[in-house]
Amino acid sequence: MSDVNIVERGRTLVVNPLITCQPLGAMFATLGIHRGLPLVHGSQGCNTFVRYAFNRHFREPAEIAVTSLHEDAAVFGGRSNLINGIKNLSKRFRPDLIGVVTTCSSEIIGDDVEGFMKVAHKELAEEIGEEKANKTKLVHISTPSFVEHHFRGYGNAVKAFVNTLTEEPTESNDKLNIIPGMVNPGDIREIKHILGLMGTEAIVLSDTSDPFDSPLRPSTTESMPFYPKGGTRVEEIADSSNSLGTISLPFYGDDAANSLEKKYDVPAKIGPMPIGVQNTDEFVRNVTKLTGLEASEELLDERGLLIDSMADLCSRYLFGRKVAIYGDPALVMGMARFVCEIGMIPSFVCTGVENPEFVEEMKKVGKESEGPVEVMPGSDLRALEVRLEEEPVDLVIGNSEGRLITRDLDIPLVRVGFPVYDRAGYHRVPIVGYNGSVNLIDRITNIVMEKYYDEQHWKLQQ
Ligand code: SF4
């Protein structure tokens, strides 16, 4: 067992934050609903930078509407902005769902969002008829931006979908509800692949895989469809009460999973993010517990390929190397355990979220680590940078926000998580499951080879 030190940020000011405000997570989750539109009840900047972040990471358009609150709304309230916004969107784009995402301003001025939504629906029904108006489900997602972080905003959105749309259970659908977290399309596809190999299907809450990675099929006869294909259908969410269980991969999906358990007796399992052997094994065991289905031969072969690539590469290139990991706490938790499995030392694990689950998990990881682990909850990239200046590591794992720091410190950066905007195609490549872990080992090893072996080999050839 190695030392685990919990280190506070030690200052009030946040420099180079690792988290942003709640609405981003809620917009992300809403875009995973089939024909779903987020309507941000706030000022224009609240959605502009989010769309930009999604565009840069996924290289896809992200349709997000905003009620565009200005100074007058801050004084008199945003009633007319929201009612007109809902009516305009419903009439023009015929969405299946509008997720009304609140922001700092609408939460602080205390807008009666639910009341305004009822008025909007009533007026809409008078204008276009009850049947057409009912086709667009309105979901209020409360995301007060001055508390917590975008991961909680994601969790709040999934909870709002479940609480608003799920219907009383009838008969089992033999499916599993999966709350994947703020992961990439490739990751969601990998989870579905594992479930397929085990003989079951998922209701993904919510399925951002196709909306954030959809085909471009230009046609001379048809215009581009406004909505991407895929996403979770409203009827699937309604049906989630008939599922065999819910697995939330990140801990921040716990509220939705627990709500389904409490209301409809759908058993819930929270975590872990299935990265590496142990965590993916636990995911597979959870699927078995909830469905009674066993891992298939194909899945065991995929596990074997992961073990094989670990045997091929770990002791030769990776063993004993020190790593710093930062970003999404659920991802950092999975990644820290994984780097221990491949013989590396998670010397620094850093996240912007202050969360007891994170700290407890890191204490467990410390027992598996070959060297001391410094845990930095509720922290920022500046704090990590300072520690890396004092105690350099061999490798940093995290999103693109650390690119300048790692460049200055001359430490290679393995890009994972969100956002990754300075590399192409990473959103398609899974890092979860056995297959995803093989991809990760390859990605890590290639970067280690490039940094620590290429030059040495070249010198030997002189
Ligand atoms: S912190 Fe508040 S004002 Fe700023 S983007 Fe988030 S919701 Fe909008």
Image (cartoon, rainbow, N blue to C red):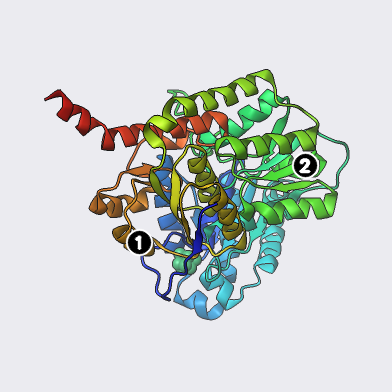
Tell me whether the residue at label 2 lies in contact with that at label 1, contact meaning CB atoms closer than 8 angstroms: no
- Of callouts 2 and 1, the N-terminal one: 2
Seen at 59% across and 64% down, the residue is: 143
Regarding mark 2 in the picture, which secondary structure is present there?
strand
User: In the displayed image of the protein, which residue is found farthest to the right?
Assistant: 170
Q: Residues within 10 Å of mark 1 (few under 14, many from 20)?
A: some
Seen at 48% across and 42% down, the residue is: 339
Front residue (pair 172, 191): 191
Seen at 73% across and 24% down, the residue is: 199
On screen, 169 above or below 50? above
Please indicate, yes or no, whether residue 243 appears anywhere in the rendered image.
Answer: yes
Disc 2/disc 1 C-alpha distance (Å): 42 Å
What is the total number of numbered labels drawn onto the structure image? 2
Regarding mark 1 in the picture, which secondary structure is present there?
helix
Q: Is residue 396 left or right of residue 251?
A: left
Seen at 58% across and 35% down, the residue is: 277
Q: Is residue 277 left or right of residue 450?
A: right
Q: Circle 2 is placed at which residue position?
A: 245
The amino acid on which the numbered mark 2 sits, given as a three-letter code, is Gly
Front residue (pair 311, 383): 311
Front residue (pair 359, 104): 359
Please identify the quarter of the rendering in which residue 455 is found: top left
The amino acid on which the numbered mark 1 sits, given as a three-letter code, is Arg
Please indicate, yes or no, whether residue 230 appears anywhere in the rendered image.
Answer: no
Q: Quadrant of the C terminus?
A: top left
Query: Could you tell me residue 186's position as x and y percent?
Result: 51, 34
Q: Circle 1 is placed at which residue position?
A: 387
Query: Could you tell me residue 388's position as x and y percent?
Result: 33, 57
Query: Could you tell me residue 330's position as x and y percent?
Result: 56, 50
Please identify the quarter of the rendering in which residue 13 is found: bottom left
On screen, 280 above or below 404? above
Q: Nearer the viewer, mark 2 or mark 1?
A: 1
